[in-house]
Amino acid sequence: MSDTQQLQDFVTQVRRDIVRQVHKVNSGHPGGSLGCAEFLSVLYQEVMHRKEGFDMDGIDEDLFFLSNGHISPVFYSVLARSGYFPVEELNTFRLIDSRLQGHPTTHEGLPGVRIASGSLGQGLSVALGAANAKKLNGDSHLVYSLHGDGELQEGQNWEAIMYAAAKKIDNLISTVDRNYQQIDGCTDDVLPMGNLVEKFKAFGWEVLEIEKGNDIDQIREGLNKAKSLTGKGKPVAIMLNTEMGHGVDFMMGSHKWHGVAPNDEQLEKALAQNPETLGDY
Amino acid sequence: MKKYTDTGKNDTRSGFGAGLTELGRTNPNVVALCADLVGSLKMQDFIDENPERFFQVGIAEANMMGIAAGLTIGGKIPFTGTFANFSTGRVYDQIRQSIAYSGKNVKICASHAGLTLGEDGATHQILEDIGLMKMLPGMTVINPCDYNQTKAATIAIAEYDGPVYLRFGRPKVANFTPADQKFEIGKAILLNEGKDVTIIATGHLVWEALQAAEQLEEKGISAEVINIHTIKPLDEAAILASVGKTGCVVTAEEHNILGGLGESVARTLTHNHPAPQEFVATMDTFGESGTPEQLMEKYGLNAAAIVKASEKVIKRK
Ligand SMILES: Cc1ncc(C[n+]2csc(CCOP(=O)(O)OP(=O)(O)O)c2C)c(N)n1
Ligand SMILES: [Mg+2]
């Protein structure tokens, strides 16, 4: 799939899946999920080289690690609609005895997930290990990871960022969901992180910015650019400027929708703004 | 059997919030820290009334523990707030070295403990925190049973000089202890006298234990119910006195069977007065998503499980 309209349809369906999953169990994280719908859709549908089916080791294919595990609704939707497990299973999100845990886990064996996440700040280290393993295996495929911007307040990230450059992990593309929001408010109110682009650069990374992180063409362009920067001795970071809650007007741009589910009326509004494309589960 | 009434379900984390707000008004040395979970920890009222005594550290729990340790040097009484998982496992060595070993007067206040935070699932549901904390020399470990007791405990630990782990939760649970209670660290509370079996419970499982005792009474079994809100230091005298009378014990906690209240009780009994014991706890497993009620049922942490364990342990006498 490479046509932008087709991809837009995919994204719209993912948005429906996100709000429907969260609404059904009256819990979960719609804001960050909606903001990353375009990115994960482009990544899985166009950019990543993926094998048929799923095996844990992922040899001879690209890997993805979701570090900000709370945006599981978008991850599950993209995984299901990319063929990793039946789309109907989205109906079991956060229910007891489900493979679709509140935060992604390997514990229940959900295809597409290679590490548990949810406790923030650990995914980059895992991605580094997987990238090291790829090098040891002579596997030239890439490792991708996604991180929240608030998540970067965790110190472990900066240990990993330092390591990645020091050890020349150049088969890694790490993206930061720069929505300037976290639970208690705007990142600049909670704990300002300053210029993240310059910080990554100062740590020795190649950094590029995607100005409109909810624009499919810009994401496609940015990811392809990032790919062209791999293999040159430096890890690659993408600062993805997204909008929390993107695509649902009353959720847009506010931390209030970080982890709150829509009620019945709000669900209807959200769905009306994102008409069914690929078919609801 | 003595009657206890639920005066209205409430979350224990709100008891913490109310206690902290009161401390803000009464103790100028109390300061609070939070790692991007102000709403979840119910700290907003304290912040509104004492903005200069609140430190938002961002999503950086290790840093928070270090800052808290530093704040004690200069006489402050820091209360840190985040989820139980990120209050313990996430920052164990920071607590161990900078707080416990250094003997700092930090109050580690942990919400969303155990399975009953519900839908967020296993990554957030720590069932090992009591064990982690009680193993630290000098650490006091408290797990109050309801809103009123959590509020009272929050106020009480400010008066005590030394590191404390205060554990509470997210779900609304029965509120049945007196609003005006004085909380005594390390002092068990005998809730119901009985002669056939001792049920020792902590946290919101105390209410389940009372329900279980009522059901047992209908079956002609007389159960003694003890609220062990302080797991360390453990009120060994109260436990031994009760088990000396009943001859067997059931422990009940929302925690792994390994490292929890049950093991502390077992050790006490083995040292002093060996007796049959059954454990109501999670059986060395991680949790999962679900509603609190479903999880209590599936993992055997409710009144029904306590009744079953009681019947079993009596047969072993
Ligand atoms: C170690 C840890 N601390 C705290 C939390 C609670 N928590 C979950 S999401 C979140 C905010 C994350 O902010 P950000 O990474 O910017 O994600 P966004 O809100 O933009 O989706 C926090 C504090 C957690 N999951 N893990
Ligand atoms: Mg953010």
Image (tube, rainbow, N blue to C red):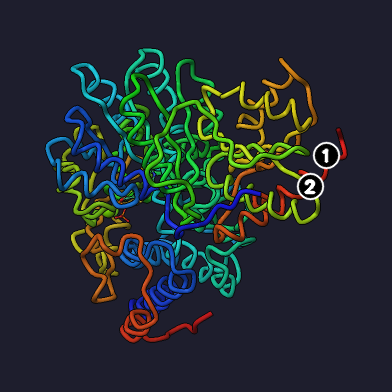
In the image, is residue A90 above or below residue B316? below
* Of pointers 1 and 2, the one earlier in the residue sequence: 2
| Furthest-top residue in this view | B102
**Position of residue B312 measured from the top left corner of the image (x, y, whole percent):** 83, 43
Report the side of B229 relative to A96 (left or right): left
* Mark sitting on residue B264: none
Between marks 1 and 2, how big is the CA–CA gap?
Answer: 9 Å
Confirm whether circles 1 and 2 share one chain. yes
Specify few, some or many for label 1: CA neighbours under 10 Å numbering under 14, 14-19, or 20 or more: many
The amino acid pointed to by label 1 is Ile
- Of badges 1 and 2, nearer the viewer stands 2
Q: State whether residue B159 appears in this view.
A: yes
Seen in the picture, residue B307 relative to B275 is either above or below; the reply is: below
Looking at the image, residue A108 sits to the left or right of residue B97; the answer is right
Q: What kind of residue is marked 2?
A: Ile
Disc 1: which chain? Answer: B
Q: Nearer the viewer, residue B249 or B54?
A: B249
* Residue at disc 1, CB closer than 8 Å to ligand 1: no
- Mark 2 — residue? B221
Q: Nearer the viewer, residue A123 or A95?
A: A95
Q: Secondary structure at mark 1?
A: helix
Q: Chain of mark 2?
A: B
Q: Which residue is mark 1?
A: B314
Q: Is residue B213 left or right of residue B99?
A: right
Quadrant of the rendered image containing residue B223: top right
x and y percentages locating residue A223 in the rendered image? 32, 57
Residue found 45% across the figure and 24% down from its top: B140
At a point 47% along the width and 32% down the height, the residue shown is B142
Q: Nearer the viewer, residue A30 or A127?
A: A30
> Does the residue at mark 1 contact the one at mark 2 (Cβ under 8 Å)?
yes
